[in-house]
Amino acid sequence: MLKNYLRFSIIIPIIALGSLPVIAEPPAASPSNAVTSNPRYNEFYEALQKQVKDNSPDFGAAILCVLEATDGDEKAVESWMKAAAKQGNIAAEHWITDVALSQTPVEKLLSPEVRATYQRMAKLAAKGFVPSMLDASMCLRQGIGVPKDEAAANKMLMDACKTGDFMARAHWLISTGRVEFFSSRTKPEVESEVKRGNHYVMFRLCNLASDPAQKMEWLKKAAEAGSSDAYFALSAVASAKKPVESRTLLEEAVRRHNPEAYFVMASGLMDVKGENAAVREAGVQPDPKRAIILLKTAAALGHLRSCMALGYGYLKGQLGLPEDPQKAYFYFSHPKLSNTVALATARAYMLLNGKGVKQDTAAGIKLLEDAAKVGHPQASIILAAEYFSGKHVKPDARKASQLLSDAAAAGAPQAYVYLAYITAKGGEGLPADASMARSYLRLASMDMGDKAKQLYDQLIVKDSWEPEL
């Protein structure tokens, strides 16, 4: 849970979405000899053992090993982790417990089952595994499975810091406001961490720098100290003018198991037709199968765009993947990302249409309402279609119009096309107005060009508007 907090990347809005509906299928079987007898199981277990030795939260090597060994079986990660946990590996136990805590709905933070899960995390923390100590500290601070206790949370964090762990000490500096500005680099406690080679602190300072030269200086320092985020950022900087150098830096970020790097590398490996000039110039050879493995690894590590790409891929039979709604729902339900509005909207669509999961229109509408409230344009568009059609809710064209206006204001120009369509037709509480419809279509055309008119004509010919993901 904590590593994503320390990545200092774009913050994704989250909403309290309640328990996830589950796919109706038999429960996963207990770990068996089929797992431990796999030729690569020992490699997987050794990667976890190294994590324990290094107090590392980086599961990249272990997960990549599972997916390579099982031809991309995303559900194998859980069974392999259970097998390792059964053998007493602390990192595997941490993974299982962390996943369980990550999917806790707000209304069940102190339920008996969540309390029991927190106790398992606390036991791992007591063994000195720093990632567990940091998660336990966060649970104490936020009241997940245990009553909020700021003092106990701080003590747990300080105990983790005493191990000398870079992530723990960076978290302490950030959470206590000791590194809020670029000028904070001169503070003794910050200087000390920089001298120790704490790449989390260096990368934080890089992001705080406003001067491009200083930003680049600290980005290079962070990379030299081992920051996968810094290698990825340097790759992005070099991508336009130095594609070969960009590729080298990107490969280093991949080697260090950076989820964003996995995603970008996968995008290049997917370019079978050679349409991306930069990818060709960098010398990246197409390898769609490898691309999918990298995407699945990034998704397992909690990378949102990879989850979305795989979910859409399985839903629509794209990226060389077979059409498989259950697997699509699997990716749209990632436990560590389930509260993000993008995945919540995708799940809502699946629930409304009974794709990959038992149909539950009430749950789908609730997810859409919550996502629309925090300004997610796609949720507003799908919900607007529901209110205009009256398929699963009482028809209300006026509400549909407001939702589409919100979506357009949030940066979705296609919402203007749908506004043009429903305004031209009119509906419950919304009188038809051809002049206003033309105005909406002109607004859409400013961003979409001829595609706006094409979409509008399709709606008119079909004389219906079905919500799409």
Image (spheres, grey):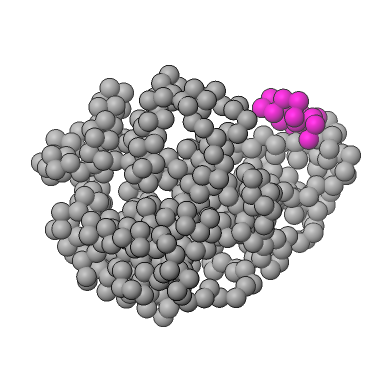
Percent across and percent down for residue 358 are 69, 68
When asked about the image quadrant of residue 349, the answer is bottom right
Percent across and percent down for residue 352 are 71, 61
* Residue drawn where x is 46% and y is 25% of the image: 282
Question: Residue 447 colored magenta?
Answer: yes
In the displayed structure, 462 sits above or below 245; it is below
* Residue drawn where x is 64% and y is 49% of the image: 321
Question: Residue 161 colored magenta?
Answer: no
On screen, residue 39 versus residue 349, left or right, reads left
Percent across and percent down for residue 265 are 47, 38
Q: Is residue 91 visible?
A: yes
Percent across and percent down for residue 254 are 39, 41
* Residue drawn where x is 58% and y is 33% of the image: 271
On screen, residue 327 versus residue 224, left or right, reads right
In the displayed structure, 444 sits above or below 3; it is above
Range covered by the magenta-colored residues: 438-455
* Main SS category, magenta section: helix
- Using the image as rendered, state which of residue 420 and residue 36 is in the foreground: 36
